[in-house]
Image (tube, coloured by chain):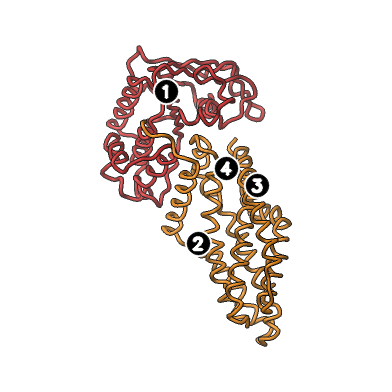
Amino acid sequence: MSGSILRAENLHLWRSERHVLKGVALTVRSGELLQLTGVNGAGKTTLLRALCGLNYLEDGQVFWNERNVREDRAGFHASLVYLGHEPPLKPDLSGSENLHFWAGLRRPTTAAAIHDAMLRTGAAEFGARPVRTLSAGQRRRVALAALVLAAVPLWLLDEPTTNLDAHGQGLVAALLDAHLQAGGLAIAAVHHGLGIEPARLRELNLST
Amino acid sequence: MSQGPSSPLTAARLVIARDLLLAFRRPEQLLQPLAFFVMVTTLFPLSVSPELAQLRAIAPGVLWVAALLAALLALDFLFRDDAQDGTLEQYALSGQSLTWLLLGKTAAHWLLTGVPLSLMAPLMGYTLGVPASAGAGIMLTVALGSLALSFIGSIGAALTLGVRRGGVLLSILILPLAVPILIFGSRATQLAIGGEPYTAPMELLGAIVVLSFTLAPLAAAAAVRISLE
């Protein structure tokens, strides 16, 4: 996992008449967290989605380990997890059933591994309940367990602490810290700091 | 991270298992096309004539038009939920082939709509005066026809994802492509009811299934990628 690098240069993106990304450039290395800041509508979510290929870039390139991601999209996607505003959990399935599916798509997973991940994010006690009956913060904890299970180097997080209580926000910081310690890298759109040690932290303000 | 990644086939199987589980947790969507099919076919004897000879003559047409419309009705649900809750987005980012995942989704859709319809078709045929001996033939033709329709329909369902209330547009897109299925399907059913060999139209139906099975998931995957923009 260590020694990975994500680099993007000269990213341009238009949303109908609006020039949202105006030549954005960024570099993130193993062990680093890049915080995306900026006012609402500055393009934080758009940038995250453009980096993983969900939004079409008018211009600019994204390199994963110095290789253009267009050359190997499947390989790039296999190394990243994107966690958006709304975690893609099916309301009629339980938390562990949802996790079993998402983790299994990437690699064979055991029930024990799923339980361990849910213990880490504090989702184990309500993991057997249908997601429909969970609160927004509880859903977020289930989604964070999916992040842990994926075991990939690159995390793209959109407001990871939304709906979480103080303890949950500390949990996100701890997860991120462990991820960075293990040589992972992360980009997170945030409104306030996540409590990561400054040495590992970089910031990109999209408002300016 | 010791184990290798899941194979495309495993991924498709996971999608099928999950969609079946979801459908059984929430059976309304499963029952809707079936209820439609039963309603239409039972209304015919009431509105046309209760005379069995006459009903038997129109039975292939009635069964097929009702089955086709019921299957079309269900197509609208194929990708809609997954598009709304971000599941399709995550499929595209899973590192797995989107084509295989959509193949799994479409197969699950057929198991949930086409198979129940084809099981119900001989029964509804019986109420239209069709001899029980034609039951197996009717079941087989409807099963094959609905399979082809599920695959062809997956292209339409993927293309109309970005459209609000795309149901009507979907029907207009798919109906011309469904016409050959209707023609061969009702011909095979007609022959089966008459007690004649019906392999020739069945083989043509089979050819449509093979063609749509090979091409439709690729086209649907391309359309889904566009809709994620």
Q: Amino acid at mark 4?
A: Thr
Q: Chain of mark 3?
A: B
Kind of element beneath mark 3: helix
Q: To which residue does mark 4 refer?
A: B99
For the residues labelled 2 and 1, say whether their Cβ atoms are less than 8 Å apart. Answer: no
Q: Is residue A196 above or below residue B94?
A: above
Respond whether the residues carrying marks 1 and 3 are from the same subunit: no
Q: From where the camera sits, is residue B4 visible?
A: yes
| Residue B138 quadrant | bottom right
Q: Chain of mark 4?
A: B
Q: Chain of mark 1?
A: A
* Chain displayed in orange: B
Q: Nearer the viewer, residue A165 or B65?
A: B65
For the residues labelled 4 and 1, say whether their Cβ atoms are less than 8 Å apart. Answer: no
The local crowd at label 2, few if under 14, some if 14 to 19, many if 20 or more residues have their Cα within 10 Å, is some
Work out whether mark 3 precedes mark 4 in sequence or the reverse, and give the earlier one: 4
Image colour assigned to chain A: red
The local crowd at label 1, few if under 14, some if 14 to 19, many if 20 or more residues have their Cα within 10 Å, is many
The local crowd at label 4, few if under 14, some if 14 to 19, many if 20 or more residues have their Cα within 10 Å, is many
Respond whether the residues carrying marks 2 and 4 are from the same subunit: yes
